[in-house]
Amino acid sequence: MSVILARLGEIGVRRFMREYWQRRPVLIRAAFPDFAPPVGRRRMFELAASADVESRLIVRHGARWSLRHGPIPRRSLPPLAQARWTLLVQGLDQADAGAHELLARFRFVPDARLDDLMASFATDGGGVPAHVDNYDVFLLQAYGRRRWRISRQRDQRLQPGMPLKLLADFRPTREWVLEPGDMLYLPPGVAHEGVAVGECIGYSIGFRTPTWQELHDPWLARFAERSRLDGRYADPGQRVTAHPGEIPDAMVRQTHAALSRVRPTRAHTERFLLEHLSEPKASVVFQRPQHPPASAMFVRAARRRGVILDARSRMLYGRLGVALNGELFEVAAGLRPVLHTLADRRSLDGDSIARAPAALAPLLHDWLVAGWLHFGGETAP
Ligand code: SIN
Ligand code: CO
């Protein structure tokens, strides 16, 4: 079990959240002293070749850049001796148990904000050219060295005709060379560019900050699906009209008043956030067990071994209930504490399962059959 970080170098996490989070960049030297990166070059190349993993290859050709989306077979990668290329592998936490544990160390931030752990391999001079992200990000140096330059510039115009969103006029004001175990935190909106100094690997631990518009569209769609209105239009007061083409003002007023009676509530918004933010990424496929145990056998095994969430599962809870992988479960009050423990710890020991109300076992059994959790002691994923 990985332990949630209490400190980022010299800075305690409480102070970090108060003074830096969402506010200003900070460089943390030796955030992970003697860092042993879980994923290296060979494993990254393997993952990039897989259709289940999102990856990108960015190659610099003079003043231009080319971008290729994965899967990228090993033979399609440029030679290691060629400078200025970079390979990005997204969702490493879902593909590798060690990366999943590393990401778990950042759970001093709510899971609802979490995006994923990305790794980037670069040959000398490679990297993603200057850009701005809508993410809070911890840039953790895994192997080798990388020069990061940043700027809080207002001018965020992009270079036209590029396959990537690159800043047209990057004017860096600060720079650092990161060594293994060093980490740079950037809030959203800070322009940045990381250039490899020799071959290197960096990990980005990203936390999403959706725009209101991005949330609005699915929020409204769910609202439309669920809201119900009684009654129908009526106009017993309608007089003979001399302007049959004109929409009656009373019709507009009456309709507006009736339709405006349905309003989204806090509960609607909470339900939406629980479902939406626990939705796995589109590329995620859960592996269902081939021979799932029948329920009586499941209960015996779960009480002995406990259960652990699959690395790809996203679990959140709120006042309305518990959401797992996009589905909300409005469970009885007595079940909540144990399910909150499962969400917070991502596992439950056998004793907690044995002590919990009987209604827990069928839920856990369904989730095991769906591939959303496994018995304890098994590796996840
Ligand atoms: C990288 O690590 O190469 C890119 C990460 C970023 O700029 O967000
Ligand atoms: Co970036």
Image: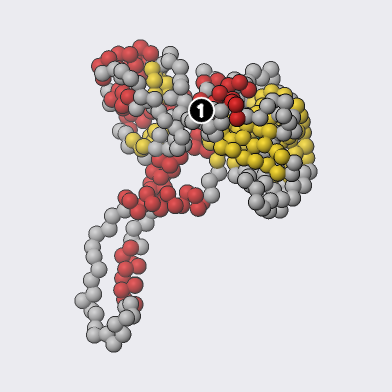
- Up the image or down, 205 lies above or below 355; here it is below
Q: Residue at x 58, y 21 (%)?
A: 43
Q: Residue at x 56, y 31 (%)?
A: 72
Q: Nearer the viewer, residue 217 or 112?
A: 217
User: Picture coordinates of residue 26 (x, y %)?
Assistant: 71, 36
Report the residue marked by disc 1.
Answer: 50
Residue farthest front in this picture: 75
Q: Nearer the viewer, residue 195 or 336?
A: 195
Amino acid of disc 1: Ser
Q: Nearer the viewer, residue 362 or 333?
A: 362
Quarter-wise, where is residue 201 in the image? top right
Q: Is residue 146 visible?
A: no
Q: Nearer the viewer, residue 40 or 133?
A: 40
Horizontal placement of 90 versus 231: left or right?
right
User: Picture coordinates of residue 268 (x, y %)?
Assistant: 38, 48
Q: Residue at x 59, y 26 (%)?
A: 74
User: Picture coordinates of residue 172 (x, y %)?
Assistant: 77, 44
Neighbour tally class for label 1: few under 14, some 14-19, many 20 plus, Cα within 10 Å: some
Residue farthest bottom in this picture: 242
Q: Is residue 134 visible?
A: yes
- Number of numbered markers: 1
The verdict on label 1 being within 8 Å of ligand 1 is no
Instruction: Look at the image and name its color scheme.
Output: secondary structure
Residue farthest top in this picture: 304
Residue farthest left in this picture: 236
Q: What is the secondary structure assignment of the residue under circle 1? A: loop
Quarter-wise, where is residue 249 in the image? bottom left
Q: Residue at x 37, y 49 (%)?
A: 222
Horizontal placement of 185 versus 298: left or right?
right
